[in-house]
Amino acid sequence: MSGRKKTLLKVIILGDSGVGKTSLMQQFVNNKFSHQYKATIGADFLTKEITIDSNKQVTLQIWDTAGQERFQSLGVAFYRGADCCVLCYDVTNEKSLNNLTSWKDEFLVQSNVSNPQDFPFIIIGNKIDVDDSKKIPSLQKKLQNITNNQLGGLNYPVFETSAKDAINVESAFEVIAKMALQQEELNDANGNDVSDDYNDAINIHLESESSGCAC
Amino acid sequence: MAISAAEQKTALASSLSAINHQSNLMKQCLADNNILQALKHCSNFLNELRTNQLSPKQYYELYIVVFDSLEALSSHLLGSHNAKQQKLERKQKLNNAENSSTSGAGNAIAANATAPFLADLYELVQYSGNIIPRLYMMIVIGTTYMSTKGAPTKEIMKDMIEMCHGVQHPIRGLFLRYYLSQRTKHLLPFGNANDFNDTVEFLIQNFIEMNKLWVRLQHQGHSSERELRYRERKELKILVGSNLVRLSQIIDDYDGDENYSSIKYYQEKVFPTITEQIIQCRDHLAQSYLIDVLVQIFPDDFHFATLNSLLNDVFINLHPLLKKSELVSTLIERFITYHKFESDMSSSKVVENESETKLGKLKLEDSEKDGDKNAEAAKDDEVDKREYESKSEENPSVDSASKPQKEESHKKIDITVLFNVFWQFYLKVFEMDPELPSDEHSVLLQSFIKLSLTYDPDNYQNLDTIYQFATEKLSTIKDEDTANQEDIWLQLLIVPIRHFKSIKTLFKLPFFHEFYLKLTNKQHQKQISLEIINKLLGVTQVLEENGATNQGEFEPEHFSTTDEVDGIFKYLLVLIKDSDKQLNTSKNLGITKTITLNKGETVISQEFLSNQEKVCKIIHLIENPQDPFKNLANLMYVRRKYLNKNFDNIIYTYPTLISRILYKLKIVGYALLRQQRKNKKQSVENNQDLLITSNFKNLSIIVDELYQYHAENNSELILKIYLNAASVADQLKQESISYELFTQCFVVYEENLILGSHNYIHHINPHDSVAGGSLPYQSIIYVANKLVTARYFNKENYENLITKLTLYGSKLLKKQDQCRSVYACAHLWWWCELLIEPTEKSPTVSSEEARKIKSVDNEKRESDNKAENVEHQDDAVTTEDEDEIELYRDAKRVLECLQRALRVADKCMDPYLSLQLFIEILNRCLIFNIYGNALVDSRYINGLIDLIRTNIDNLREDDTDLAAREKETENEEDDKEARLFRQSQGYFERTLGYIRDQQALENRFEGILV
């Protein structure tokens, strides 16, 4: 059975409300785009199996999150165990671009990843189908500025996509999958044994705890 | 149950490690293919979910970890199922091949073969001891089972949702059902209408149960923990909301047959059930959250379709403490975003739009009629309501009929209909609860305004309806706290101002003004006026754009008709009438910046002054390029109707108004003159000429008014205004007007300036010829400066004026003022330049006179020629002369003036001052000499130079020390006399140097001995 072990890769999509996180995910997983705007309530995921490097089969578990804080009342426990984080902005909304940093910081604080310095992030600017006149002026410069000054000068891959017209969505997620796989392999290499030891050590006094009602 | 946060943390940590441990054990067992043992470990870690020590957030962390572990189990089970299935199929094929004749046994196996494995497991876990692990395992196995081919999906769903009733502990129950919904989400069947209905039923049932659990949580435990419960419930809300998300998704995904319309389905099935639940639960938190989710999660089309019912059946029946304004404003916010989104989308589809706008227009016209009717018959609620119900029911049918072009039909949202639905709802709310607090009203109405402006910026009807209502009904409501209430109304008025593209929209809203007038607090009225002004001047724009980008692009609006002027100035009246005399305590505390006026008698605040300045800027916007006379009439009108409502303030606004009027007069006047010059031969009887005259008369009334009220402290300013007007009048050949205005200047001078009651309290240095004069002296110089450019008086009038002025000058109190004003007035008798078109003839110069001058000029020219030095520089002068320029010149009077000045200077008691004045006069003589006054000849000038020399010598001799001191005090500035003497000497030397230079270069000043 274990001969063909399937790898589950957890991807989190973050970004301001209305930048098109759900649309990106829907476009990638279901090849659908809806003109209707629906706020995302809580967090939910879709899965998709893809093959990368023409031989590795992986399952992407893509978590779409609520951009509006009031729809995220239970906290962000689902960040844990993420293998890649997608930071989204809207190419027509400068604020969403400027907020990328805070989304990244928030993610690193909450997700408790072991390698915050080189955890894989990817940046997606969505809605490139929109008329040029509405786009953020001198976008490239501003983006450059943000990556240099606020995102620690790390060169995260940047994609400009249109969830509406399905431009660049596939290729972006391909890169996401590759990065996530790398991260997952890294975790496997140095993570598993440690957590096992840790569990054994604590386990001793757990057996006695069985209070509470019967339901 | 109340345990400390620290205890909770340790409980969480130990639960987490237990889960990890058991989960790893489970995975090992799975790897060994020991499923029963694996399930035991699974049940062990699921036991951790039975805790009741954790907060919802912490419980969620456990849940996530458990979720991941169960996924591993599920994928393993699925894997082994598939493997077994393959084996079975292979066996089956074998069997089939072996005994194809005895098919009975083979079929039995095949029927059984679908999945005994998972079905067995599903049965097996039912014997698990505790209900929480049991149900989680049921769900994970059940859903895995569902994902396989040929599974009895619906039975499993039914079973699972029934079994979930077993957990009635709110938090655990909520998470369990959340798990159910997460696991089932992509397994839900909706292949046909039946399946779809069942699925919707399943989701709705889960939603209802979760909502019950969620509401019940509030009523559990000790009453002292109410707050805690409330907080916990707030955290848990997304679990309940997630069901509605699923519902919305499934409705989206289901395509249905051709009779199916998702909107209709929502309207008939989903919406009533959900909203009934929401209403029935009678829980404040649940209602506000779920309505929010409902609004956010379903498409706008759905809301448009159910709007009437949502407002009138749902919102009305919600918890009375729930703020309806909040609900409505979220809904409206959503509609506004939708509209923006749609217009973004449609900007690319230009072609489609064209046909649509036509359609839209037709529809708008229809509904406008309706709108009118409604506004009139607001009382006939019932009739109206029926109308709207039928209307809103029409909408979905329109939508479903035109389903193929669904996208297009999105845009046909008719604002009038939409607005009216909201409006009826509002009236109903008002009727039901007349005590509704003002802020509720305000929020509601503000939302309506935004909605209307977003969907149709040109629809004023709706806004006016709002303001009419506000004026008639709301302003009569008296809260105890009137000030606060007014604040709220203020917001209501400010909102549209910020949203209008053009401020002129306001003119179309008569009730806006009515409501504005209902504000009793002047401060509030002022605030709105300022808001309007700032909008007009583009101030807000600039602020928003950080003063950089948009500034250049801002194009201020102009007001070209009386109505427009009325429209804007009625809002400015409060500023115009504003008086700043009683300064409040903030001034005493030094908070308000103040400015002292009128010799310290008046104190005004900086703010007041800047407000008046803004009013002035608005005056500049009164502009009508097509019809300047209309423009002038508007300016006059503003003064008559608005600006003179407070005479105290006209001093701030009139100067702007007057200069504006003068500017306009100049433009029309010059145009007229040019026209007259063109058709020289035709008679000049043009009524435009009369119009200009009458405008000047009106103008002089305005200045008179200003003078009447502000003579005491502002005479100097008023004098300048008169002078300016007089000068313009002269340039436009309005001789009698100009004459009167100059006379008026003399009146001001005599009445208020002659005594020198000036505002400045600074030391006047008599030796300073430029800035050292008293106010009366300055006034004379002002007048002289204007008179010297006047060209269209007849000789008599002109001489009258200049004689009078010279006389005033000679009667000044101080000798130096007398002297200087007289020699300055000398220039009035000797024009040096023409200033007017060379072809024209100045009426001041009688032809007889001109001839005389010409002869004098000729004489001079002859003498020039005698000098034999014909250089090119001279040519300029010569040619001018040859063109028969006629200038007003009276050599005798010039000489008289100079003589008079000399006499006065001589009489000065202060010898240094006297010397200074002599040198000044010498300089004047040189000018007259250059410009050809034959009486001021070299002999005369030589005499003057001698006189000055003598004076210098005398001064040296008089004060024997002086020379000595002169050397000593070269570097010391204390000795005033020495310094003055030195200055005068230097001045004299420079003058002589000038003469020498000119003699060398220009052949001037011949015969002057230096």
Image: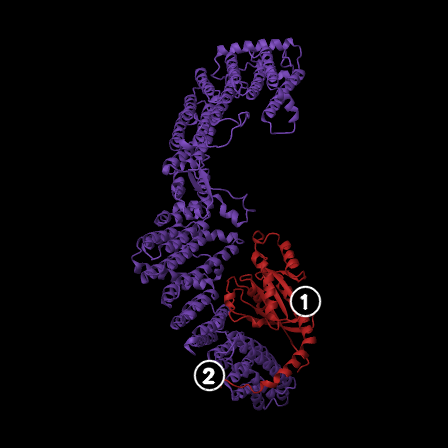
| Mark 2 residue type | Gly
Left or right of B334? Residue B87 is right
| Residue B248 coordinates in the image, percent (x, y) | 48, 69
Q: How many marks?
A: 2
As shown in the figure, which amino acid type bears the numbered disc 1?
Answer: Asp
Q: Residue at x 53, y 25 (%)?
A: B766
Can the viewer see residue B668?
no
The residue lying at 52 percent from left, 52 percent from top is B350
Please provide percent x and percent y for residue B528. 42, 48
The residue tagged with tag 1: helix, strand or loop?
helix
Task: Look at the image and give the colour of chain A.
Answer: red
Reading the image, the residue beneath label 2 is: B166
Snapshot quadrant of residue A149: bottom right
Q: Output the chain of dot 2.
A: B
Q: Is residue B145 above or below residue B317?
A: below
**Percent of width and height locating residue B799:** 45, 16
Give me the C-alpha separation between circle 2 and circle 1. 47 Å
Q: What colour denotes chain B?
A: purple
Residue at the spot x=67%, y=78% of the render? A194
Q: Name which quarter of the figure residue B948 lies in.
A: top right
For this orientation, the residue located farthest to the left is B380
Label drawn at residue B1000: none
**Residue A183 in sight here:** yes
Q: Secondary structure at mark 2?
A: helix
Does residue B809 lie above or below B611 as drawn? above
To which residue does mark 1 refer?
A118
Query: Is residue B385 depicted above or below B717 in this figure?
Result: below
